[in-house]
Image (cartoon, rainbow, N blue to C red):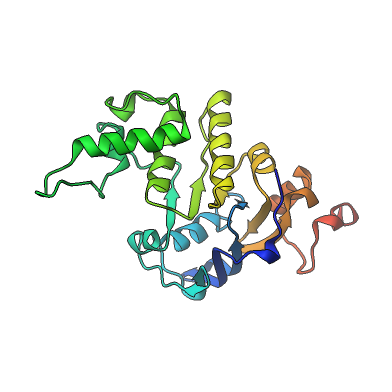
Amino acid sequence: MTPHTQSALFPLVQMTGIEKHFGGIRAVNNVSLDLFPGEVVGVLGHNGAGKSCLMRILSGAMAPNQGTIKVNGQAAEIRSPQIAREFGIETIYQTLALADHLNTPANLFLGRELKTRFGNLDDARMMSEAARVLRRLNPNFKNFSDPVSSLSGGQRQVIAIARAIYFEAKILIMDEPTAALGPSETALVGELIQQLRAEGIGILLVSHDMHDVFELCDRVVVMNKGRVVGAHAIDEVTKDDVLSLIIKEELPADWSARNLEAMA
């Protein structure tokens, strides 16, 4: 992993003072987060910590009660997933949101189908474009005409990633991308993430897999009870430090991962 100099780059995303309330419950409580080009930031926390809610806000699936979002330095009111895509934000959910009965090209262009000048579906062009983008990610990808229900978890993940980058995503939210994958397919997804990083795409990686986080991420942001309780370069913390942040019940405002032993 080659670190970059953040000060020399302009953030792709700046989320500042984000709040989301459900009645008296503050699911996201004054959270700020940024993401730079070619950076992978791990977003961690136990279930209910607020990380998924925060990502839904960025993806346009949920509106915040308060706070601002900037994309490439411009104020962005992301009221829907369609608007998020217009800002170059794509989300790959754990469920992948693929239509199992459709083949690879149909899934790649689902809702954004290519058409001929007569307004008909351009199946030949969609097949050609699907082959081009998928072989860029995985030269061994085949089975373009088979229903995606017959494909492996790794192949399905490749389709979901291909769909995002074909439409020129600059910011990619990945929700548990290696969940339920075997070792070889997990390695493949890791290689794809490294490839996307090299192309300047910023990735927010939501994961419970500590190995993935430490293998792939430049920084880690940990949420607990709706707040960010730690944001560190990955080489400044250990897995135990991060785990303690995730499970700590109450944390003083000036908590630092370096203070873990002193507080034990």
**Residue 146 coordinates in the image, percent (x, y):** 28, 24
- The one nearer the camera, 252 or 156, is 156
Question: Is 218 displayed left or right of 257 in the figure?
Answer: left
Is residue 135 visible in the rendered image? The answer is: yes
Residue drawn where x is 33% and y is 39% of the image: 98
Decide if residue 95 is in sight here: no
Q: From the viewer's perspective, is 234 left or right of 191?
A: right
Residue 18 occupies quadrant: bottom right
For this orientation, the residue located farthest to the left is 118
Q: Is 161 on the left-hand or right-hand side of 111? A: right
Task: Give the residue at x 75% y 62%.
Answer: 251
Which residue corresponds to the image point at 9% horizontal and 48% vertical from the top-left?
Answer: 118
Left or right: where 163 falls relative to 118: right
For the point 43% across and 51% down, the residue is 91
Rendered-image quadrant of the N terminus: top right
Give how far across and how far down residue 236 sits, in percent: 80, 52
Picture quarter containing residue 147? top left
**Residue 149 locus on image (x, y percent):** 32, 27
